[in-house]
Amino acid sequence: MSSPRAPKPTDSHSAGAPSADPRSDVGFSASGTAPSEATQPVLDLGSVEGAGGEPQARGPSPLRRGPGTESPGLEARTESLGQRGPGASNTRGQTPAGQGRALQHGVDSLVLAAKGEVPDFVLARLARALNGTSAVGVAQIDGHRFEVSRVGKSFKCANADCALILGRDQSGFDFVFEARALYLRTHRLAEVLATARRLASKVLARAPRFVRVRRLDLFVDVAGVTFGPGDAEAFVSRAKKGTEFHVPERSYTRKAAGEVQTTGFMFAPGNPVLVRLYDKREELIHVHGAGSEKTKTELAAYHAAGWLEGEPVWRLEAQLRTKGLQELGVTDVSVLERSIPALWDHMFSGATPWLRLVVLATATRRERMAIDPRWEAFRQQHFLASDTPAPLGDGLRGGISPEQALGSLFSLLGGHGALEALSAEQSVAEMLASDMDAAVRLLKSHLPYSGADYLRLRESARARRSHLEERDEVAS
């Protein structure tokens, strides 16, 4: 199997018809056939900045004891850890004593949900963006380009940095924001939260009184350590009731040089709290690709933190969803940043952490066994504020590679008997041009698209890969 990859939820954004709302002429537009910016209708639902903003903390402690949190002194530990500073979307790590050294830590996934009512005219414009029966369309929100699609009765708007879901869900939430991992790596957490508030202000009729944290993934990357199948029996976890020996439910492997190599473990999959431990370089190269924005960004950050080329890097990642966050008292976004240090401490560093790796036979009971030296860099990591998010690497924004595109071209032509004989005397450019011409003729004869249909699909693909910084020239 390939190395584990953190699941990435997806989410959405906006559309409509003329409205009497006085705010309906500034920052939101939607298009099913992607007209030029000069002709696109524009809508701004105003801002919630002066309407209360984020709610205040609902309790005295960002982390309170709840079901499954058997760690005594958690509130006191949270209070002291909170003084270290808020969690950051990207920071360099310290180098603790022991084997391995932390390169970086941060937030790898963040999903927020809010109640605030999406006006009917916004939903109408989103419907118009899909041109009635189209699978995808394009919308602009606050000058940012989004691909629009349907998710049940709601609308999804997505680009390379975030995804939004607009429409009342079964839990009564109207707006869902999901920050992509790369956006979190290249921006401070405070900036990401500000982006969520700003986008919400453009599509909701009123400022949300409560913003729920639906998912939070925290990670630490450590260089100079490796793990293998023999480590599976040395994990002690509280994933189930009580403190007990807990073999990973899943192990990930890859065959290389004739040998099966362990590339990762997963603990408690499908539960509100789960943990992954995996070879990060393996994931970057074999899942994202060596030339991707993601890989180039991460490797550049490793080098900046003193990583040596070829050195192993393993990531420890905690994924907390709604129920797990509720048990720990971290559902309100207003307490999120200051709660992150204590969350990591609860998971891996406290007196009775959720997961740890021990040295077998150092005690008669597993919970009393010594901590494996390779685990020290993970458990001693503290989440501190950072003013230096990683710079975005210059690489591919997803999609298929040039090699995969060439294979698809040959598959298309070969399947239709259109691979013509070529001469070895022709250059690669000449042969490629010949095959591309054949593909154009084939596609023209088989695709039932009008010019408007083609442009809509093309603009949708363009929006899907755009970054928030790449603002379109529209009024805002």
Image: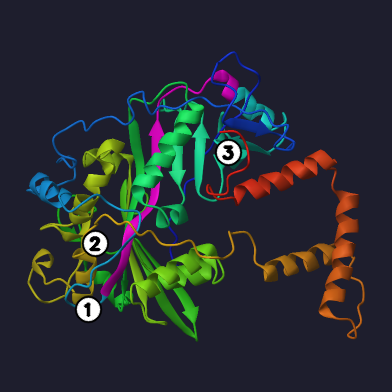
- The answer, for residue 474, to whether it is visible in the render is yes
Q: Nearer the viewer, residue 44 or 379?
A: 44
- Outermost residue on the top side: it is 20
Residue 150's place in the image compared with 437, above or below, is: above
Name the residue located 55 percent from the left edge and 65 percent from the top edge: 394
Please state the horizontal and vertical placement of residue 215, each as a whole percent of the image: 36, 44
The region drawn magenta spans 101-122
Coloration mode:
rainbow
**Residues at circles 3 and 1 in contact by the CB criterion of under 8 Å:** no
Q: Which residue is mark 2?
A: 246
Q: At which x and y percent is residue 121?
A: 59, 20
**Mark 3 neighbour density, 10 Å: few (under 14) some (14–19) many (20 or more):** many
Q: Earlier in the sequence, mark 3 or mark 1?
A: 1
* Amino acid type, label 2: His
Q: Residues within 10 Å of mark 2 (few under 14, many from 20)?
A: some
Distance from disc 2 to disc 3, alpha carbons, whole Å, reads 49 Å
Task: Work out whether residue 252 or residue 215 is closer to the camera in this orientation and state it.
Answer: 215
Q: Which mark is residue 99?
A: 1
Residue 132 in magenta stretch: no
**How far across and down, in percent of the image, does residue 15 sit?**
61, 28
Judging by the rendered image, the residue that carries numbered circle 3 is 143
**C-alpha distance separating marks 2 and 1:** 23 Å
Amino acid carrying mark 3 in the image: Gly
Q: Is residue 112 covered in magenta? A: yes
Q: Is residue 391 left or right of residue 218?
A: right
Q: Position of residue 199 (x, y in %)?
A: 48, 35
